[in-house]
């Protein structure tokens, strides 16, 4: 009888103390403060899938960057001006952006994000993972 009460108390206590989180909280997805200023953010077309995973990059607060949307830049995830080659007939323009805090950010490399230029997890979708337009 004593063992049964002891066992029940242990089970109750372990259930009460089990108020822990099993998954870490989702990281905050940053936004581009220049989104409303530049019309390139309103482009409806996305570029080719450059990579199936995001790229972690240290960015400085207040500094302007240009994120490659076409997917053809040699300096991914940033633009190198490849879209200007008129023989390639690229219609996408780079996305100009800034960050509010100096830290590391996950930049989209699949070029399909809804939160340009930051990764929003779109690369996990089946059609992105099976894309054949990836540059190697």
Image: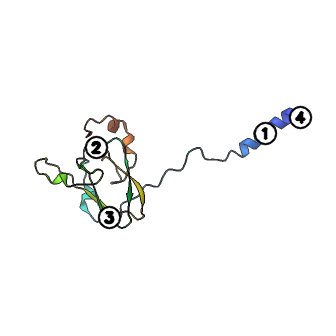
Badge nearest the viewer, 2 or 1: 2
- Circles 4 and 1, Cβ within 8 Å, touching? The answer is no
Determine the residue located farthest toward the bottom in the rendered image. 62
Residue 64 in the image: above or below residue 135? below
Q: Of marks 2 and 3, which one's residue comes earlier in the chain? A: 3
**What is the distance, in whole Å, between disc 4 and disc 3 at their CAs?**
68 Å
Q: Residues within 10 Å of mark 1 (few under 14, many from 20)?
A: few
From the viewer's side, name the closer residue of 35 and 68: 68
**What is the distance, in whole Å, between disc 2 and disc 4 at their CAs?**
66 Å
Badge nearest the viewer, 2 or 3: 2
**What is the distance, in whole Å, between disc 2 and disc 3 at their CAs?**
24 Å
Q: Of marks 2 and 4, which one's residue comes earlier in the chain? A: 4
Q: Of marks 2 and 1, which one's residue comes earlier in the chain? A: 1
Question: Residue 2's mark?
Answer: 4
From the viewer's side, name the closer residue of 112 and 100: 100
State the SS at label 3: loop
Residue under label 3: 34
State the SS at label 2: loop
Residue under label 1: 10
Determine the residue located farthest toward the left in the rendered image. 87
* Quadrant in the picture for residue 37: bottom left
Q: Of marks 4 and 3, which one's residue comes earlier in the chain? A: 4
State the SS at label 1: helix
Q: Of marks 3 and 1, which one's residue comes earlier in the chain? A: 1
Residue under label 2: 50
Instruction: State which quarter of the image contains the N terminus.
Output: top right
Q: Of marks 4 and 1, which one's residue comes earlier in the chain? A: 4
- Circles 3 and 1, Cβ within 8 Å, touching? The answer is no
Q: Percent position (x, y) of residue 131?
A: 29, 36
From the viewer's side, name the closer residue of 21 and 53: 53
Q: Residues within 10 Å of mark 4 (few under 14, many from 20)?
A: few
Q: Residues within 10 Å of mark 2 (few under 14, many from 20)?
A: many
């Amino acid at each position: 009888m004593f063992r049964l009460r002891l066992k029940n108390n242990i089970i109750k206590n372990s259930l009460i103390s089990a108020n822990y989180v099993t998954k870490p909280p989702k990281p905050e997805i940053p936004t581009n403060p220049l989104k409303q200023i530049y019309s390139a953010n309103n482009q409806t077309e996305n570029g080719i899938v450059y990579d199936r995973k995001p790229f972690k990059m240290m960015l400085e607060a207040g500094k302007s960057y240009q994120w490659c949307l076409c997917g053809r830049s040699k300096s991914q995830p940033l633009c190198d001006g490849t879209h200007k080659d008129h023989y390639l007939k690229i219609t996408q323009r780079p996305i100009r952006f800034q960050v509010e805090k100096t830290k590391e950010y996950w930049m989209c490399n699949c070029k399909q994000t809804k939160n340009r230029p930051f990764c929003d997890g779109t690369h996990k979708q089946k059609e992105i993972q099976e894309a054949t337009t990836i540059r190697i």
